[in-house]
Image: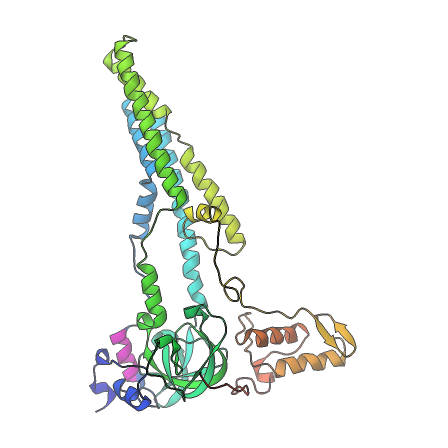
Amino acid sequence: MTTTDVPAADLTSDPREPADRLFRDLRTSANGLTGREAQRRLEAYGPNELTRRRGNGWVGELGRQLTHPLALLLWLAAVLAALGGTGVLAAAIVVVILLNAGLAFAQERQAERAVEALAAYLPVLTTVVRDGDVRTVEARTLVPGDIVTIAEGNRISADVRLVAGAVEIDNSTLTGESVPVVRSADQTDASGNLLDACDLVFSGTNCTAGDARGVVFATGMHTELGRIAAMSQRVTREDSPLERQVKRVAWLIAAVAVGAGVLFLVLGTTVAGLSLPDALNFAIGLLVANVPEGLLPTITLALAVGVRILARAGAVVKRLSAVETLGSTTVICTDKTGTLTQNRMHVTDVWTPAGPVPLRPAETAQVRRLAEALALCSNASHDPAGTDSGDPTEVALLRAAGELGADLDPASRAGDGSPSSRSIPLCG
């Protein structure tokens, strides 16, 4: 039976079972899938990417801004002003509502686009074995049963069971722990937590050392990263402290305004001797006067300024109210490397036997030799766009070599792209 005789949707497997049985369950082999079979499975499973649950869209988001508790109070004031014969005031209030809703909507949509732009940092290409040949394909086209190769500096594009080699993996994406862990095809573990299995690597993690080959057993939303993404989308939206306070203020203002209007209506007709229509007009005017039309845009503008300040510092804020939530936070519990810091290193000082040297193109033969040695002995990968990859220490040394004037072109670096000489200890 060939792979094309088996419906791709029927493929199920336990990634911790023996490799030969896993190959059988995934209907694949060490030579990988054929291009035709990979395309068929892609149609059955869908692309290897995280899908986002669609909400109410821009219509729902804009509607939420127009039905804010304080906005509803302003709508009521506009209706009452129109009924009281002050059409200009009613129109002004409506303009205030629309301008405020537009500003808040545009700000949150801009933040949403910024969050989506972060997905561009995920890997778009991966190395796979198709039709017995090693080739580079789009990571989104990976399917269960594909054989992939993993090298130092690579980001894992799917959940993979190693079948050859050993690597060190930065699992901080899934576990928050920045210390790399060893994963080896020789160390099998059929019990315990899936994330702790010594022969499994997962989508979204980074290879910091070693070389290996493995078989893909889960893609897209079926990966461990996909499960985390699905859980994060099921989290219900809760009001921030500011939103709860604004709701209380809106109810208080409404109660005071209505109470004052009703009281004046009674006093106007019984004590002041006004006719019912005149007393009603005065009561409506009193109601409208008690509504603070400028409060809502003032709050929105203040929060928007806070978002801009955070954006200049590199922070992404999806909701305006989150700015106030951050401001009212008294205790923040966080991890250190890779969470509180950026998990990046940089060479600040360089010494030679002749003494310290500045980080600029080499002026002496001794410094030039140092720069060449840094470039040739680094296993990190250089990208002219600035997105170097590899172990943070190796990347820092490679960038220092570039600052000292060394040629970082992969073609000129002996051993670049070859298997790492760094030894990988056994898992466990």
Q: Is residue 13 left or right of residue 347?
A: left
Is the C terminus in the top left, top right, bottom left or bottom right quadrant? bottom left
Residue 102 spot, x, y in % from top left: 38, 43
Provide the residue span drawn in magenta: 36-45
Q: Is residue 354 left or right of residue 31?
A: right
State the predominant SS element of the stretch in magenta.
helix
Hey, which quadrant is residue 126 in on the image? bottom left
Q: How is the image coloured?
A: rainbow
| Above-or-below relation of 196 to 332 | below
Residue 11 spot, x, y in % from top left: 24, 81
- Residue at figure coordinates x 75%, y 81% from the top left: 366
Residue 47 belongs to magenta span: no
Hey, which quadrant is residue 357 in on the image? bottom right
Residue closer to the observer: 308 or 187: 187
Is the N terminus in the top left, top right, bottom left or bottom right quadrant? bottom left
Residue closer to the observer: 405 or 233: 233
